[in-house]
């Protein structure tokens, strides 16, 4: 049989280990909560950015893809729109017209 002092020391060691485990779990829970909060914030930022992209007009997206300002692309569309409607309504083949020159914008 063990001496009483050894048993008391063993119980104290187990209790100390259990307390340390509880402290470690509490710290881990705090870290997890903090990261979950950061992930949620990032998800909200992504959703807001996606809404902004959806609101962007097709012309603005096209201008961005072409590395042009929306104003330049809009102007080019206005220049070519009358020619396009004439071609669509005419039965005759129109003479070739030069495409408008679109200068890239500097970013």
Image: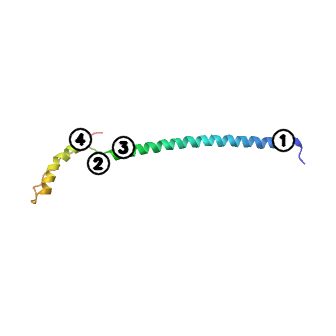
Question: Mark 1, residues whose alpha carbon is within 10 Å: few (<14), some, or many (≥20)?
Answer: few
Q: Mark 4 points at which residue?
A: 71
N-term mark: 3 or 4? 3
N-term mark: 4 or 1? 1
Nearer to us of marks 3 and 1 is: 3
- How far apart are the two marked residues, 4 and 1, measured between alpha carbons? 83 Å
N-term mark: 3 or 1? 1
Task: Indicate the position of residue 98 as horizontal and vertical percent values.
Answer: 14, 50
Q: Mark 2 points at which residue?
A: 58
Contact between labelled residues 4 and 3, with CB atoms less than 8 Å apart: no
- How far apart are the two marked residues, 4 and 2, measured between alpha carbons? 13 Å
Label 3 sits on a secondary structure element that is: helix
N-term mark: 4 or 2? 2
- How far apart are the two marked residues, 2 and 1, measured between alpha carbons? 77 Å
Q: Name the residue under label 3.
A: 52
- How far apart are the two marked residues, 3 and 1, measured between alpha carbons? 66 Å
Question: Mark 2, residues whose alpha carbon is within 10 Å: few (<14), some, or many (≥20)?
Answer: few
């Amino acid at each position: 049989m063990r001496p009483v002092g050894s048993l008391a020391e063993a119980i104290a060691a187990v209790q100390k280990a259990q307390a340390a485990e509880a402290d470690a779990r509490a710290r881990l829970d705090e870290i997890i909560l903090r990261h979950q909060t950061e992930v949620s914030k990032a998800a909200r930022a992504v959703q807001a950015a996606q809404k902004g992209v959806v609101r962007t007009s097709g012309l603005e997206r096209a201008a961005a893809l072409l590395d042009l300002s929306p104003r330049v692309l809009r102007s080019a569309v206005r220049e070519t729109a009358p020619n396009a409607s004439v071609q669509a309504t005419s039965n005759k083949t129109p003479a070739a017209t030069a495409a408008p020159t679109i200068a890239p914008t500097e970013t």
